[in-house]
Image (cartoon, rainbow, N blue to C red):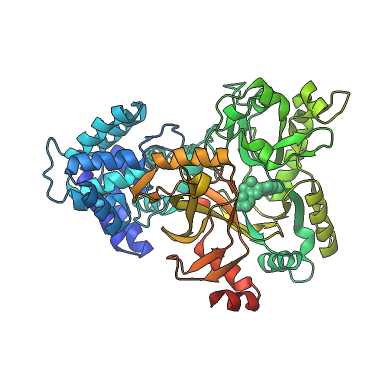
Amino acid sequence: MPTRFLEFAELCEALAATTKKLEKRALIASFLQRLAIPDAALTALYLSGTPFAETDRRALNVGGSLLSKALAEASHASRDAMYAGYRRHGDLGAAARDLLADHNPSGSPLTLHDIQHAFDTLASARGPAAKLPILLDLLNRSHPLEAKYLVKLISGDMRTGVKQSLVEEAIAHAYSAETAAVRRAVMLQGDLTAVVTMAAEARLAQASMKLFHPLGFMLASPVESVEKAIERFREETGISDSPVRRVVLEDKYDGIRAQLHCGDPAQPSRVELFSRNREDIGASFPELREALAHFDEPVILDGEILAWNPREARALPFAALQQRIGRKQVSAEMLEQTPVVYVVFDVLYHGGELLLELPLAERRAHLESLISRHAPATAVTSPRKQTLLFSEPAPLAFPRLQLAPAVHLESATQLDRAYAEARERGNEGVMLKDSASLYEPGRRGLAWLKLKRELATLDVVVTGVEFGHGKRAGVLSDYTFAVRDGDTLKNVGKAYSGLTDAEIADLTAFFHQHTLEDYGHFRTVEPLKVLEVAFNNVMRSGRHNSGFALRFPRILRIRDDKPVAEIDTLARVEEIYNSQPERLNEGESK
Ligand code: AMP
């Protein structure tokens, strides 16, 4: 019997009703056990909140406005009823259930397989006009509860409190496998559905690395001072006298983090670069692809793409790279004017071996030998225009592939100096890494610390937009933004300075496309745009639902490279609040 989508929706409802992790895991595991393998595979995938496997590059491309339109048509709800429904829940899925409460599903009952088929069709349909009938068919066939989870699944906002890691644990329980074996297979295969099949058939050990699907990125935790950094390592390593010897120091580059996959013998010249959003950004950097196409050993490297000044052998400011972001075609002029390099600081896979579980010191040794073998072949001569730009008569050769310098930490004074030197080289600060640490994909732990000592900044997501004033009256230039608090978003401020007119024009078009509710002057928008904001300090305030407000927020940049799941948290805001001098807190809370 094919599994009904209604059963899946009921499972989601039961999952959302409990906060207990073990209960959630048991619910998922027993559900999976009851199903045939293909349906269990789809269940695991959909529970993790995505319509397609990680290795599958397709996207539904159904935005909030198209979903709202389909919902309005299917439910015959008025504009006011739509707004009221959305406002009641702050969630389009929950609103869909209310709006379709009296709806009698027509046609054959939806199965998981039908949903999969509809997703395939949605992904290949071009444009809203082609996608709308598919959405309407699905909604017309849905029970109210099905509509709720259908909309949630399409908008990627399940709110069942189930993360992929819990789904992995449940798979292990359902098929009596080790959780570690399931997680390893997911990492290697990048496909939950394939892993469910392997687990069910007791074949997890056969999982093998597939190049060209991104692994998670290891992330760093912030520290404010040299002293704090050393103290943190002392706690982390448990070494009380001199933990510094275990620490490696690197510059913190201000470019675009990218994971490089290349050298597959089966596809010799294929080169892919993935951003932290797991998007393939290779098309924006054709010169890197070209330079790395001759790499004849399969590798996955971790590093940073930087705009480069070859004459001074240092990075150009991030702004020089910004024009490349999201670009599918790069003009010859852009290639000439802004040379880019790939600075590597880690190796995750090489020659058939996954290296994540080696300590950093060993990975680094591996990396050094790799780079010394391959970097020379990536050397290019800087183009003429570039040399003119830097008033340099002779063209300069520089490798596109570069090793990030690393040194052992010796003392607090050396760290202080390294920080100052990194800043002088145009980099953001320094990274401190425990040389005994393993590479933990997707983890922001204490094995990597980032030290940037300027004013704290926060990565936030825009939740509301407003038209500006004066010459900005026609554009959406004021942005209300939020941080993460568990599964929800909490607003912490509103900013209207720091972006160029061109950026504001782009954002205006973007937010028109992604408006959820339109109140005339103010709109709520889908939480998709990540901004990095600076501010003077944090104060307690009832103005926003977080209970905090940033004082004098300024937008430093749009961070299309950063997934919304990785923005800063309310806990971090609170931490900054608590770290401020008492004087500031008292002064601002009045
Ligand atoms: P943030 O974007 O503020 O969360 O800072 C973490 C980011 O620092 C990473 O995602 C990288 O893009 C960047 N980064 C710069 N230099 C390094 C480095 N040497 N090692 C690791 N990450 C680095």
Looking at the picture, does residue 240 appear above or below residue 393?
below
Q: Is residue 166 left or right of residue 107?
A: right
Q: Nearer the viewer, residue 366 or 226?
A: 226
Q: Position of residue 361 (x, y in %)?
A: 74, 49
Q: Is residue 138 left or right of residue 385?
A: left
Image quadrant containing the N terminus: top left
Visible in this render: residue 370? Answer: no
Question: What residue appears at the point 60 percent right and 67 percent down from the top-left corner?
Answer: 576
- Res. 85 image quadrant: bottom left
Q: Nearer the viewer, residue 237 or 34?
A: 237
- Res. 300 image quadrant: top right
Q: Nearer the viewer, residue 584 or 521?
A: 521
Q: Position of residue 475 (x, y in %)?
A: 47, 43
User: How many numbered marks does the figure carry?
Assistant: 0
Q: Position of residue 9 (x, y in %)?
A: 24, 49
Question: What residue appears at the point 79 percent right and 39 percent down from the top-left corner?
Answer: 314
Residue found at the very far front of the displayed protein: 470
Looking at the picture, does residue 478 appear above or below residue 128?
below
